[in-house]
Amino acid sequence: MRPYRSIFSPATTQERRDNFEDYWVYSQDHAGEILEGEKNLTRKRDALAKFRDRSIRVRKPLADPESFYRNYVRLVDDPRRLDRKTLLLTFIYKFARHEWAGISAVWDGIPTMGQSKSTTEKISRYHLCEEFCHIRLFHEMFRTFQLDQIEWIPLGRWMGGIYRYLPKLPESIMSPPAFVSELMGLTLYRHLDRLLDDILADEPEARDHIRSMLREIMIDELAHTGQRRNFIGPLGMAVSRGMVVPMFRMFYRDLPESKCLLDVDKMIEEAIAFDYNAMSPDVIAASWVPTYCRR
Ligand SMILES: [Fe+2]
Ligand SMILES: [Fe+2]
């Protein structure tokens, strides 16, 4: 029998309450003490230092770094004319920039760890620190490609406004889109992982380095997906399922590189049928799964 059940499996209120406690114990053990002033976590900080200390850089820098810098914030050239490495990197930046803008907006709108009373408030603060750690890992990916001039540029007024408004919504309204965005991240990282073999075939050290950082992120995202699912009751689960297609379509329409790199239909299919059994056992072992998704 397969050991895991669907992420959309039903759960009682009591089960969800117990799972928050379980997740909170897991995540502190996984990522360490919070360093709120740095938006950081001790174990994650140490893991990043280890990645940086390896100082792995591509053997051959991008043929035309200028084309990366010209297109990374906004794509101005025809994506079909860009080489695949540049395209992959400008895409990763745009995706990560959305994450960064989203978490930066939420950071100022939720209770600090000191102000947090409930376990869910503490989880939310801690979760954001993990996301900031992901941005640092993405930054290290660009450095691996000798791209040291990256800046994290805020989104325009319209998108930036949406992200600032989201944390002000009641939990029940905010939870389904928050869950689907975690699912979207997780699905994307699995697809990116597959692309690495093809696009970085001539850079085996850099490919392995990027892959291990991506794996670190994936372990967190798998846990976040279960954690965000745990906020949601039966009605919200139906809403979430219905939001997968429109949210994926809307999001990827805004990232023009995705047409050349990814199969969005396939990602939608994988998200709706998301199956823990498809994750590699070492990732699952280091991550967290709600009890009602285990058999
Ligand atoms: Fe993330
Ligand atoms: Fe996440």
Image: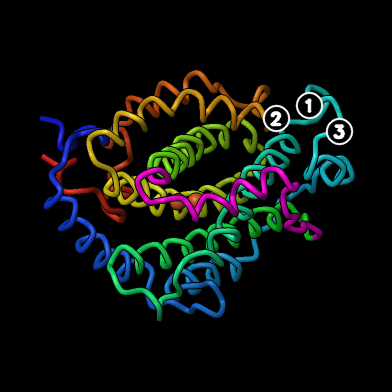
Mark 2 touching mark 1, by CB under 8 A? Answer: yes
Residue 25: percent from the left, percent from the top?
A: 24, 68
Marks 1 and 3: which is nearer the front? 3
- Which percent across, then down, holds residue 240? 37, 33
Question: Counting residues from the N terminus, which is met first, the one under dot 3 or under dot 2?
Answer: 3
**129 relative to 90 in the view: left or right:** left
Q: CA distance from mark 2 to mark 1?
A: 6 Å
In the rendered view, tell whether residue 263 sits above or below residue 115. Answer: above
| 101 or 271: nearer the viewer | 101
Q: Secondary structure at mark 3?
A: loop
User: What's the residue type where badge 1 is placed?
Assistant: Pro
Q: Which residue in the protein does label 2 denote?
A: 257
Q: Is residue 17 above or below residue 272?
A: below
Magenta span? 149-175
Q: Quadrant of the C terminus?
A: top left
- Lateral position of residue 147 relative to residue 195, left or right: right
Q: In this orientation, does residue 212 appear?
A: no
Q: Is residue 187 magenta?
A: no
Disc 1 versus disc 3: distance between alpha carbons?
8 Å
| Residue 174 pos. (x, y %) | 43, 46
Crowding at mark 1 (Cα within 10 Å: few <14, some 14-19, many 20+): some
Counting residues from the start of the chain, the first of labels 2 and 1 encountered is 1
Magenta region, main secondary structure: helix
Residue at the outermost top position: 265
Q: Which residue is mark 1?
A: 79
Residue at image mark 3: 76
The residue lying at 24 percent from left, 41 percent from top is 233
Q: 50 or 192: which is nearer to us?
A: 192
Camera sees residue 37: yes
Q: Amino acid at mark 2?
A: Glu
Q: Quadrant of residue 87?
A: top right
